[in-house]
Image (cartoon, rainbow, N blue to C red):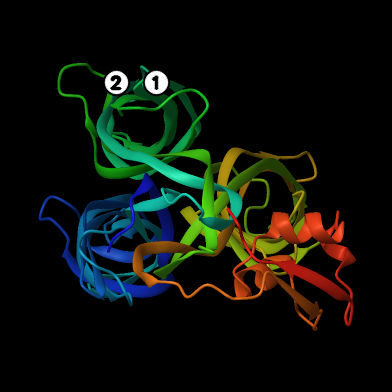
């Protein structure tokens, strides 16, 4: 016969699987008839857009494209500098164990490197090296028994604090603006574009999340009189996400993903470039919740049986944010004091070491310079090794952490000695995730009546591993009665070989 209980419903979330996988995307681009032949590739770059993610049984499918720009030396009488813009589409299926369609997936795609090979004077091949950081999350609603409605029930309880999912929401936001270029410049073509999302911020209020950020755009362009210039700007991003039952006390993790981006000369206004980006903002909201978990139970007078199930829960999520300031004086002989038109930065963490209350990072910053020369334009890659120490109370060698790295600021100045003063500020956000496996009572039933012991008192000698709970359950007594009869005030008073009296339950 089933025993009546009270149950509390909570939504528990845990990471089912996390995986990084590299893959390659290739494509051939034919140079349009209106552009001159290619003689030499100077620089190739790209912006990754992911417009669809689908989670299937045992795998994740990612669809997107890379908006590529190739700057090249033209094979014409003046050896002019020109560029090609080409969309490199991809659809990648990645095997991820234990995933199911009803789970949630987070995908971060990073462009590790991009290469261009000249096939002939009218055709190039572009190869992009990508890395997908995939995290599959399960949000499961479970009922946890916190009260058993039986008069003489004895329960062993534990109070736990867990991170419970409040909900997930998303919104499509659009960053649109017109960047004004120099009035003396008549725009011929866009040569290179960089897009980064910076200054991320969120505000939680009742039933709503306000997400704000800036889309930082840097554009290198060519004028109709074959001059090279650049323009940059910050375009506000804002999105409101309706989410029931959230409040300011909740914890929110926000992710921004560029779905599509359009960069083109403004057809309406001269000396300007139109920028439009479609961005998906996703928020995962959690709350710290204290729950009562019944670890074990018995009845001195009634035979009961129960089953247990194991749940994996997140006990707590914490994060710290700090800036790593890179200050370096680089010697790049090829630049030789010439004008730097563009400098793009890529950060790679190569080693992560966990210590007590500390995380140590070692990595490398790759900088690609595009600069003027006597022959027109060239590019050069340099590398700066770095190390960074992040203080984090509670971290140890066994901790489960995640790290996000973002460029907050960058500046490159050619000094009087023709070296380059490099200033790069990197924001490190480190997340500490404490997971736990808990056993909870799942189902309770009353069986046939228990045979009562004939003796009213048992003399018992404590064995190794005994606890008051184990002894009371074994002899159908209660912890309170054993403590009362023996004058025990502390569990530590149970010494091996000690004689204690166990009274029969008379409740």
Report the residue at 43% width, 59% height from top: 14
Q: Quadrant of residue 366?
A: bottom right
Q: Nearer the viewer, residue 407 or 249?
A: 249
Mark 1 to mark 2 CA distance (whole Å): 7 Å
In this rendering, would 284 be left or right of 335? Answer: left
Q: Nearer the viewer, residue 95 or 413?
A: 95
Which comes before the other along the chain, label 1 or label 2? 1
Residue 58 visible to an observer of this rendering:
yes
Percent coordinates x, y for residue 390 in the rendering: 75, 51
Q: Nearer the viewer, residue 373 or 502?
A: 502
Q: Is residue 109 above or below residue 308?
A: above
Report the residue at 85% width, 58% height from top: 488
Percent coordinates x, y for residue 306 in the rendering: 40, 69
Q: Nearer the viewer, residue 332 or 252?
A: 252
In this rendering, would 316 be left or right of 23? Answer: right
Q: Are marks 1 and 2 in contact (CB under 8 Å)?
A: yes
Q: Which residue is mark 2?
A: 271
Percent coordinates x, y for residue 395 in the rendering: 73, 57
Percent coordinates x, y for residue 255 in the rendering: 40, 42
Task: Bin the neighbour count of mark 2 within 10 Å (Cα to Cα): few under 14, some 14-19, many 20 and up.
Answer: some
- Element class at badge 2: loop
Q: Which residue is mark 1?
A: 182
Report the residue at 51% width, 55% height from top: 153
In this rendering, would 3 be left or right of 394? Answer: left
Q: Quadrant of residue 45?
A: bottom left
């Amino acid at each position: 016969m089933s025993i009546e209980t009270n149950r509390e419903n909570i939504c528990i979330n845990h990471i089912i699987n996390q995986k990084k996988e590299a893959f390659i995307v290739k494509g051939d681009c034919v140079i349009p008839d209106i552009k001159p032949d290619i003689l030499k590739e100077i620089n190739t770059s790209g912006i990754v857009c992911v417009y669809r993610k689908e989670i299937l049984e045992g795998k994740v499918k990612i669809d997107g494209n890379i908006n590529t720009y190739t700057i090249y030396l033209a094979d014409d009488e003046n050896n002019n500098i020109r560029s090609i813009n080409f969309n490199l589409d991809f659809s990648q299926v990645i095997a991820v164990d234990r995933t199911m369609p009803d789970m949630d997936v987070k995908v971060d795609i990073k462009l590790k490197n991009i290469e261009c090979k000249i096939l002939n004077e009218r055709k190039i091949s572009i190869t992009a090296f990508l890395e997908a950081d995939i995290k599959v999350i399960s949000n499961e609603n479970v009922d946890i028994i916190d009260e058993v409605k039986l008069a003489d029930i004895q329960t062993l309880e534990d109070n736990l604090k867990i991170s419970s999912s409040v909900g997930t929401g998303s919104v499509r936001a659009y960053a649109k603006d017109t960047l004004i270029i120099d009035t003396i410049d008549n725009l011929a073509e866009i040569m290179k574009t960089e897009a980064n999302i910076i200054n991320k911020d969120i505000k939680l209020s009742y039933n709503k999340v306000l997400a704000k950020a800036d889309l930082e755009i840097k554009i290198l362009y060519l004028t109709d009189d074959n001059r090279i210039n650049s323009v940059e700007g910050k375009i506000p991003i804002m999105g409101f996400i309706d989410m029931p039952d959230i409040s300011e006390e909740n914890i929110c993790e926000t992710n921004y993903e560029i779905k599509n981006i359009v960069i083109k000369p403004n057809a309406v206004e001269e000396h300007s470039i139109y920028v439009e980006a479609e961005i998906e903002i996703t928020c995962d909201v959690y709350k710290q919740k204290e729950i009562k978990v019944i670890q074990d139970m018995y009845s001195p007078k009634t035979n009961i049986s129960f089953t247990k199930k194991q749940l994996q829960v997140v006990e707590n999520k914490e994060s710290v944010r700090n800036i790593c300031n890179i200050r370096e004086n680089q010697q790049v002989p090829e630049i030789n004091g010439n004008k730097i038109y563009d400098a793009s930065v890529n950060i790679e963490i190569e080693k992560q070491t966990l210590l007590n209350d500390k995380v140590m990072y070692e990595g490398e910053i790759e900088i690609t310079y595009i600069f003027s020369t006597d022959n027109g334009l060239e590019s050069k890659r340099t590398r700066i090794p770095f190390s960074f120490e992040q203080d984090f109370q509670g971290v140890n060698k066994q901790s489960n952490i995640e790290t996000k790295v973002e460029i907050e600021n960058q500046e490159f100045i050619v000094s009087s000695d023709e070296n380059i003063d490099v200033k790069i500020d990197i924001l490190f956000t480190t997340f500490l995730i404490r997971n736990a496996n808990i056993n909870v009572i799942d189902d309770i039933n009353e069986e046939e009546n228990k045979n009562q012991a004939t003796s009213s008192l048992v003399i018992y000698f404590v064995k190794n591993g005994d606890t008051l709970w184990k002894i009371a359950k074994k002899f159908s007594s209660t912890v309170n009665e054993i403590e009362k009869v023996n004058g025990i005030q502390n569990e530590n008073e149970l010494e091996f070989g000690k004689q204690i009296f166990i009274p029969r339950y008379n409740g």
